[in-house]
Structure formats: C-alpha cells, structure tokens
Image: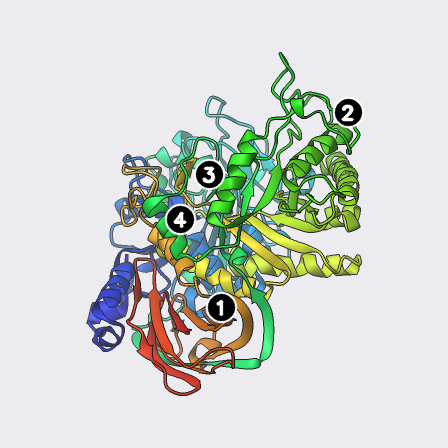
Amino acid sequence: MTLLRTIRTGRIGRWMGRVGPSLAAAVVAVFAVGSAALAGAAEPSGKTRVLFVGGDWKSQLPNYRGEKPMRGHFVRREVERAAPGKFEFTLWTSYELLQYGEADSLGRFDVIVVGDIMGQSVLPRLVDALTHYVEAGGGLWYCDNHKAFSFNTKQLSFDAVLPIEVRPFRPYDPNMSQPIVGSKRSKKDAPLCVQITAPDHPAVRGLNWAEAPGLRGAHYGQVKAGAQVLARTQSGEPIWVAWDKGKGRALWTGGVFANDEMSSQFAEWPQFGRFYAQTLAWLAAGSRFPRPDLVSAEAEATVRVDLSRALPAVTSKHFGIHGQETASGARAMEGDDLALYRRLELGGTFARTSAFQGVLRAKGGKRFEFLDDGTDLTTFDWSKYDFKKADAVLADLKRIDAEPVFLYWCPWGRMDRPLDPVQYTKYFAASIQHVNGTPGTPRYRPRLKYFEIMNEPALSPAETELPRYAAFFNHAAAALKQRYPGVKFGCGGFYEWSYIQRVMDRCRGNLDWVSRHPYGHTGDAVFYLHDQYVRHARSLGMKDLKFIITEWDFWIYGRPAFDYIMQRWKPLLDRADECIGTLHYRWREYAEGGYVFGVHGEFDKRYGELPPAWPNPGRDKPITYRYNAFWAMRHCRGSQYAATLECPALAKGPSHRAYAVATRDGGRLNVVVYYGYPRVDLAAGKQYETLRLRVQCELPKQVKAGRLVISRANCKETTEAAPQALDGRRLDVQLDLPACSAVSLTVE
C-alpha cells in the first residue's frame, strides 16, 4: 500500500512536536499499515492506476483463513502475474468510497473497480462524482455480488453510468428488484456457463473461454441503447455489457467480481488475471487524468461555539453498545472488563434484551408451542411463566446503570400457521407486568419503558405479509398502550426502504418508535434516510415518532472502522431529539460468518478473520479502532450548543470530513473536534494531512473557570494531557489535529 507523501518525504516533524511523539508515531503507523487510504497518491510511473473498491471486511484480508488473499489482494496478484509492471493498485473498502468518493479523490485513477457496495448508502455526492469521472474519461467496472443492486432508488444508484437499467432494491417484493439468473444454485449444481457474444472485443479477445469455469449466478438488466453485450448465459440473459459514456467507458459483469461468492470457481481459471488485465486496459483507454505529485499541507480551521443557539440535548443513550448486560451463557462485566466500560461514562444508557420472555413451552410441545394463558390482560396464571432470567438481567442492568429496551422475539415466518396476535399480546402483557407491576396500584412503575415487538421479521411477500404484520402489531400495541401507561411500543429491524413508510401508513398512532438496523450504512446515509422517514411521519400526523438504532456496524476493521464510527456521531447528534438512542453491535467480540464484531476483547486466542495489522487484542483489552471512538465522546453529554468548524480548504469538497460538537453537562463544558481522511486538492496539488485548529468559546455561566483537559484519540491509542489552568471566562486554544483523529477539550 502506498504511504502518505508526508511519511515518504519525512515532512512530519512539524506536527510531531506539537501533538507529542506517542500519538504522532501511532498516526504514522496507522497511515503506513492501515487500509489503503484516500491519501497517498502514487508517484508518476506510467502504469495504469486502478482503484479497487473491494467491499467490506473481506477486502481487508490478504490471507483469508491462512490460505489465500481475498478480493483486491487476490485480483492485484493475478493481474501482476499476467501483466507484470503494467498496473498499480490502490485498495479501498466500500466505506471509503461511500464516505469520500468525490471528484478529487477519484480523479487520481484511470480505472475504478467497484464490488460489494451497500447501495443503500449511495448519496447524491457519489452519484455525481462517478458520473463526472466516467464522462471525463475514467473507466468504471461495476462487479456483481449479493449487494450489487441494493440501491434504494434509481436516482441514488449508478444507473447514470452503467450500460444496463438499474432497478431499485425491494427485498420483500423480489419481482421488482434486479433480475438474477442462477441465484439458487449451490456448489453442487451445474455452473452458469458464460457464452461470449463479442469475441473480438479487447476485454475478452484471445482467451480460451471453452475452459473458463462457470458462475454461481449473475444479475442482469435491460441493455441500454448504444451498449454492447459481451456475454450471455446459456439461456440468453445478457450478463456482461459494456459501453462508451462521454469520454470514458463503463462495464457491468454479472456474476464476476473476485475470488468469492458468485465467481469463486471462475477465479480459479488460469486466465483470470489476463482477463482482468485486458479489461482494465480497455477501460483505461480514455483516461487523461493528471498524475499529481501532492505536497503535504496544513489547513487552517476555526471552531466557534454559539451559546445562544441550542441544539438537541445529548445523553449516554446516544452512544450505547449492544450486549453489555449479563445474558444467558455470558459472564458479567467485572474487573478490567467493567473498568473499560466505566471509562466510557455510559451510565443511563440503553440495553436491549430479550430476557423478559417468560412463558413456558407446553409439555411435549414443539419449539414454538407455548402454554395457553387465555386472553384476559388483567389476570395471569403465573405458574405458566418463569422470569428468573428476567430478574437476573434486571439486577445486572441496575448494577451497570442501564435502561432496558425489551425485545420480544416471535417465531414470525417459522410456524406452519400464522401467529395469533391475541395469544402473543397476553405473553407481552405478562412480561411488562412482571417488570412494571400491576397498573392502577402503588407498585406500578414503568421500569420497562420501551417494548419492541419482534426482531427483523421477514415481510416477504410484502403484498400479504406486511399487512398481516401491521395488523399483529396494531392489535398488540393498541391493547397494551391502554393497559400499561408510560410504555412505548416500537417495531422494525427489517429492510427499510420503502417498508418503514408502509408500516407507518398502517400503524400510525400505535407506533411510538421505530427500531433500525442500518448495517453497512455511512452515518450520512443513515440520517439521510432518517430525514425521509421523519418527513413521512409528519405528513401522517405522527409528530412525536421517535427512532432508536438498536443495532449498527459496518463490517470493517482498523482505520476505516474508526472513521466510520466517528463520522456517524455528528449527524446523529444533530437529530438527538428524534433519534433518542443507539446501540453499536456489540460490546464483546463475536464472530459471525468470519467477521468479528465487538468493542472489547473476549479471547486470548486467534478469533474470526482479522487483518494482520489489526489482530485480536486479547481478553479484556479494547478493540482500539472501535473503543476509542466511544472514548473520544465520553464527555459529550447534556445541553448542546451550535458549533461551527470553518475551514476553506475542506469547504471545496462535498464529503463531510471534519466537524465540531459542543455540550455542557452541569458544570462541565466539552468540545469535540474530529478530522477524517485527509482531503486531496488536485488543482492546488495539496493533501491536507493536518488541521491547524483554533477553538474559541465563551464559558457558559454554569461552568466555573477552572481546569482544561485535552485528550486525543485515533484508531490506535488514546492520550490525556495533564490538566492546565484556564484563565478568564473564555476558551481560546490553538492546536494541531492530524487526519483520522479526534480531540476533546473539557473544562470543569
């Protein structure tokens, strides 16, 4: 991976002295070994410059399962074997393209290869940047995988530059989504054969296609006028399509990406690297983008806090982490584990649990056959319930000072008959009453305030399942709201667009809050959709509807993961009165399909699939690239004030790179400033690796002039300077802020 020019030329001494050797060394190491970054343009070499956007966690694995490189690592190796010295690869995760894809960051490459991207996170700035890039002479190769056509709308997709028509993603209406052939094939089924229809095209010419392995499936679409079909399936579907677009070129290859998913067998073809090299050369033919020798630079920036402009209040609930409470089979937080958690100052945060499900299974019954307790919500046969687990979790939540969000899991779609809403409403009522007490009595106290009906219910086919689900929710919520004052009922966790709106349409006043699971979404994309949902709710008269993100993550490691978490805080806190809480998935290490979730280390052994640069930290150690993003915000609580960050050098680009947040919690003032990936200005020939920052703020009257503590965080480490005396009633501090790092200034 290419190092930053600052590191290559040694121009790092100036800011090293300012931020301290420990943090500076960590930042240098991160730039050197982290995911291939936006920063770090290659030296002029005449090679074809390829940006390979390889998706999420697999794109970061040079030695998957100790056996093979994955995604871009694999393609780069095969292309180099086929065409030594002809191509120069830069590897990005999909997050980096979604967050930072803009004209200047893309204009340093001749070809961009994109695969495994979360289409639901595509925003107008990326659509505009890719369209401009291709029309100006760049080559775009869009590759297939299971997320290839996960776009919410045609407008927010790559339709403008692709040679096939794009359909919006409607997972619960499969006939409306992008068509796919061979999607049900297993490894045992006969492969999908590629039939070349344009044998003289430079991308496919001269290769032995008769011996090419088949594909495990392929998306396809209506071919646009002026496009050329390069290959079809044996049943005639056009799966590889190319065209000239403006001064550039674009290619769609259904079924082909790298060495996993649909093209795992195809990638074993000895001529795979040659096919890739020929295709890249054809796509790059129109590129005339400059080869800049970027100079490292500092950008002047000023943060001003306006105490007269109040923003939504911030609580610990906005920084919650899933799975911190004791659950079945998990150890309680204690010792170093608990100390790490306490350092994040999460007292009062949310904890989502399903521990309050107490109804017993019928003797001799199947898995989901529970005892019948009738329909009367005012009387219960408590012998049919067991709440020992609920009581243990409640006690643990009290110990760690967390407020429960209760998820009642139901076997939606797993029964041979529809669920009975009357039966389950009784079960819901028993859980609420066990925790909160009997309504109308002195013992009634809504300790359980947020009740979620089902987790990620499958709503396919939407034509029948969505109305049935809404009817189930409406029956339960209407009855329970009347019976249990102070309890708010929500649902969600399913594929969102446009199903959240359709649930709102049907549930309206029964729906108090929406549960969201925006995995693989940038912070900007999460709240771009949030704003759409809020507008829709307001149009229905649902003025008090709230949102809780009960699970979120991006399936990436290292520096991109740290940046992802830090970049989601600002849009969240701007809407802190509407999105009242979030829960990152999750506190302890947890592997799913190889990917390792978690904020805190659980094991002293190799666990899951991790990049060499970001190994398992060990038991009760922080996973720094996630943990540190929460630590940086540990003092961000209370009343929020408008904070503006003015930086002319960053204002020229459309991507959100830097921000400031100011809060006051009692007598403590806190200002957090974050600067993400360094901005490249091709016209100026500069790469802004550091902000020269001035922070100015009058002290609120509640804050006594006292001491100032400056702390810093990046994906590798955290530092906290010794307190310094603060003279007068004004905070006026100058400091340097390296890219991909945060600074927190606390006055108390």
Q: Amino acid at mark 4?
A: Val
Residue 374's tag is 2
Q: Nearer the viewer, mark 3 or mark 4?
A: 3
Mark before the other along the chain sequence, 1 or 3: 3
Say which label, 1 or 4, has the lower sequence index: 4
- Tell me the mark number nearer the camera, choosing from 1 and 4: 4
In the drawing, what numbered circle is on residue 656?
A: 1
Q: Secondary structure at mark 2?
A: loop
Q: CA distance from mark 1 to mark 3?
A: 38 Å
Label 3 with label 2: CB-CB less than 8 Å: no
Left or right, residue 529 beside residue 52: right
**Quadrant housing the C terminus:** bottom left
The foreground one among 252 and 187 is 187
Residue 25, position in %: x, y?
Answer: 23, 64
Image quadrant in which you'd find residue 629: bottom left
Please count the marks in the image: 4
Residue at horizontal 74%, vertical 33%? 425
In which quadrant will I find the N terminus? bottom left
Quote the CA–CA distance across marks 3 and 4: 16 Å
The mark that comes first in sequence, 1 or 2, is: 2
* Residue that numbered label 3 is attached to: 326
Q: Secondary structure at mark 4?
A: loop
Residue 641: quadrant of the picture: bottom right
Quick check: 385 above or below 629? Answer: above
Q: Nearer the viewer, residue 23 or 663?
A: 663
Mark 1 vs mark 2: give the one in front. 2
| Precedes in sequence: disc 3 or disc 2 | 3
Type of the residue with mark 1: His
Residue wearing tag 4: 599
- Asked which secondary structure carries label 1, the reply is loop
How far is the residue under mark 1 from the one under mark 2?
Answer: 55 Å
Between disc 1 and disc 3, the foreground one is 3
